[in-house]
């Protein structure tokens, strides 16, 4: 479950592969019991997800990661730019995983993230 | 510290509670209780848990027939109706939401309790008189009062309560070290303006400073996490119906607000305390020796 990378669909799509790379860094230490959909692209960690994070576009991911705070995330949720399908509370608890992860990111990982974010 | 003038409070309360009674009806239980429920068992449904909460409070207040109750911030009147029906008391409720006051008085009439109960659209600061009530309940109010007005709030209750009276304060508290953060800013900007839940120690200190004696304190944080999670489920189930009263953005604002509140209770960032107090007197307080009667 840990250290697995997302199965990216469509596999030949460069943006999908970059999104997969971002997710793999952010969720490196998380339980991978969920999947992510970004527009028509899919990042799959499991066949049996507890919830699916649905984000409308790579642009939303870029914006939310570069200005990562709960206020911006809440506004984006209200506008429907992202959503949780399935267990909403379980999905929202991911915020802690992300906040904890922000503290453990190594410089190399941060650079990789930034490059991928800007290439989205 | 927020100003909490009468005008601002009127505006804040109207913003949160005058949205539409029908909208609240789509996620609250049939008795329109918009406060922490009390789950006797993990699987208890919301309606029964809300009634159990009112029963729990009525028992803590040791309500007896013909006593007079003041319910500050009485909402849609659920506790007043429960207490009048089951304990034969007389009740006076005040709320800063006109929609709630109208709803409560209609409900009181439907139940045939108009000789026993009255709900008014009125600011708690405008209640006059001394030693008027045997019992005072404030369920989900202290978080709206604001730090600036806490002393006044507790002084007012001390003045209105009879000597042998009991006062139950049921409200949200924040941790002592709490500081504003982007998440809480969003909630106060978009959903719940000017909310200032005081820490438990602040509530206790204020009670002590206004010559109250604290009789009992109970934390119901786990119950509030469950209550909010139930509200989220009901709101989600009624998504279509909600859109007849509010737009999609408002619906999503409320979903997120209730879901995040559930998580904040779960994580111990906010708490729900019931504090029972009596007036400090040079004789024994008007409560039994033990709490056993609450559970009898």
Image: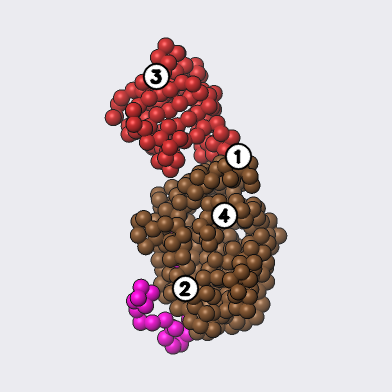
- SS state under label 2: helix
Label 4, on which residue? B25
Q: Secondary structure at mark 1?
A: helix
Residue tagged by mark 1? B248
Q: In this rendering, does residue B142 appear at all?
A: no
Is B234 contained in the magenta span?
Answer: no
Looking at the image, is mark 4 or mark 1 earlier in the sequence? 4
Image marks 3 and 4: residues in contact by CB distance under 8 Å: no
Question: Which residue has dot 3 on it?
Answer: A8
**Total marks drawn?**
4
Quarter where residue B124 is shown:
bottom right
In the picture of the structure, the residue carrying the numbered disc 2 is B58
Give the residue at x 53% y 68%.
B79
Give the chain coloured brown. Answer: B
Judged left or right of residue A67, residue B8 is right
Query: Can you say whether B259 is above or below B157 in the image?
Result: above
B12 relative position to B205: left or right = right
Cα–Cα gap, marks 4 and 2 = 24 Å
Of labels 4 and 1, the one closer to you: 4
């Amino acid at each position: 479950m840990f250290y697995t990378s997302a199965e990216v669909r469509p596999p030949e799509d460069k943006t999908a592969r970059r999104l997969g790379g971002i997710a793999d860094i952010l969720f490196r230490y998380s339980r991978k019991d969920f999947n992510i959909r970004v527009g028509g692209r899919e990042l799959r960690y499991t066949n049996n997800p507890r919830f699916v994070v649905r984000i409308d576009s790579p642009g939303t991911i870029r914006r939310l990661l570069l200005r990562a705070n709960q206020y911006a995330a809440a506004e984006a949720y209200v506008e429907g730019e992202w959503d949780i399908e399935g267990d909403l509370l379980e999905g929202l608890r991911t915020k802690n995983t992300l906040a904890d992860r922000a503290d453990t990111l190594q410089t190399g990982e941060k650079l990789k993230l930034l490059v991928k974010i800007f290439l989205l | 510290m927020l100003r909490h003038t009468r005008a601002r409070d009127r505006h804040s309360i109207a913003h949160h509670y005058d949205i539409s009674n029908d909208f609240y009806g789509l996620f609250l239980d049939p008795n329109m209780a918009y406060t922490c429920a009390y789950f006797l068992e993990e699987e208890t449904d919301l309606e029964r848990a809300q009634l159990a909460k009112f029963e729990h409070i009525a028992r803590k207040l040791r309500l007896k027939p013909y006593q007079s109750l003041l319910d500050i911030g009485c909402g849609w009147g659920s506790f007043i109706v429960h207490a009048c029906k089951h304990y034969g008391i007389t009740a006076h409720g005040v709320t800063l939401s006109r929609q709630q006051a109208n709803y409560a008085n209609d409900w009181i009439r439907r139940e045939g309790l108009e000789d026993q109960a009255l709900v008014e659209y009125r600011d708690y600061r405008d209640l006059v008189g001394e030693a008027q009530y045997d019992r005072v309940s404030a369920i989900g109010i202290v978080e709206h009062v604001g730090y600036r007005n806490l002393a006044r709030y507790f002084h007012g209750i001390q003045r209105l309560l009879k000597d042998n009276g009991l006062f139950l304060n049921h409200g949200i508290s924040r941790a002592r070290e709490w500081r504003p953060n982007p998440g809480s800013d969003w909630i106060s900007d978009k959903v719940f303006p000017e909310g200032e839940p005081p820490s438990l120690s602040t509530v206790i200190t204020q009670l002590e400073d206004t010559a109250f004696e604290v009789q009992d304190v109970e934390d119901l944080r786990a119950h509030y996490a469950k209550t909010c999670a139930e509200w989220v489920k009901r709101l989600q189930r009624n998504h279509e119906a909600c859109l007849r009263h509010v737009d999609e953005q408002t619906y999503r604002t409320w979903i997120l607000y209730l879901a995040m509140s559930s998580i904040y209770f779960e994580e111990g960032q906010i708490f729900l305390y019931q504090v029972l107090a009596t007036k400090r007197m040079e004789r024994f307080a008007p409560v039994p020796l033990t709490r056993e009667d609450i559970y009898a």
